[in-house]
Image (tube, grey):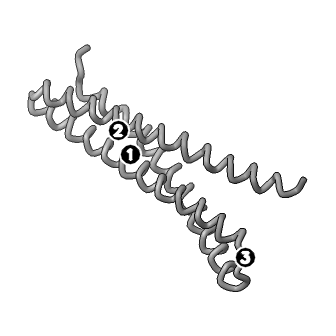
């Protein structure tokens, strides 16, 4: 397969949308953590503490997802620079690493979604 300048450029829109989704998830969790923290400080509710612990784990995952996504974007840019400079082998390696980082980021997103669903199921089981 021949790699040209447009191939890594295709990742820009995909990674940008992923980073936007990751940021939205992060902001939602941050607001929820602030609300639960306030509730825990006022009432000492153990349930709020358990939810905060769960959310803390999810925030760490999202942070790592964002870092991998940003790293993938950086490597895509460096790949394009390498290809522009005629360093095809280096460009291919950078593009491959970029794709691997993106895959790991997406895998972490799957884990974060599973944790989120598990927390919601626990919350809903309270109703029974």
Where does the image place residue 80, in percent across and percent down from the top left?
21, 35
Horizontal side of 113 relative to 82 (left or right) equals right
Determine the image quadrant of residue 32.
Answer: bottom right
Q: Quadrant of the N terminus?
A: top left
Q: Are marks 2 and 1 in contact (CB under 8 Å)?
A: yes
Q: Which residue is mark 2?
A: 101
Whether residues under marks 3 and 1 lie with C-beta atoms below 8 angstroms apart, the answer is no
* Front in this rendered view, residue 17 or 64: 64
The x and y percentages for residue 99 are 34, 32
Q: CA distance from mark 3 to mark 2?
A: 39 Å
- Along the line of sight, the residue nearer the viewer: 34 or 42: 42
- Residue neighbourhood size for the residue with mark 3, other residues' Cα within 10 Å, grouped as few (<14), some (14–19), many (≥20): few
Give the residue number, with chain letter if any, for mark 1. Answer: 69
SS assignment at label 3: loop
For residue 45, the mark is: 3
Mark closest to the chain's N terminus, 3 or 2: 3
Mark in the foreground, 2 or 1: 2
Which residue of the protein is positioned furthest toward the front in this rendering?
A: 46
Q: Residue at x 55, y 40 (%)?
A: 110
Characterize the local packing of mark 2: few (<14), some (14-19) or many (20 or more) Cα atoms within 10 angstroms: many
- Count the marks: 3
* Label 2 vs 1, first from the N-terminus: 1
For the residue pair 88 and 120, the one nearer the viewer reads as 120
Residue at the bottom extreme of this rendering: 42
Q: Earlier in the sequence, mark 3 or mark 1?
A: 3
| Farthest-out residue, top | 1
């Amino acid at each position: 397969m021949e790699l040209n300048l447009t191939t890594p450029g295709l990742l820009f829109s995909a990674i940008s949308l992923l980073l936007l989704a990751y940021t939205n998830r992060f902001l939602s969790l941050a607001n929820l953590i602030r609300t639960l923290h306030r509730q825990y400080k006022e009432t000492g509710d153990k349930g709020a503490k358990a939810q905060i612990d769960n959310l803390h784990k999810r925030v760490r995952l999202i942070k790592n997802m964002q870092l991998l996504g940003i790293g993938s974007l950086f490597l895509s840019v460096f790949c394009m620079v390498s290809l522009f400079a005629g360093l095809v082998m280096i460009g291919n390696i950078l593009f491959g690493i970029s794709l691997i980082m993106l895959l790991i980021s997406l895998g972490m997103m799957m884990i974060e979604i599973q944790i989120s669903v598990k927390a919601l199921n626990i919350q809903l089981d309270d109703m029974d």
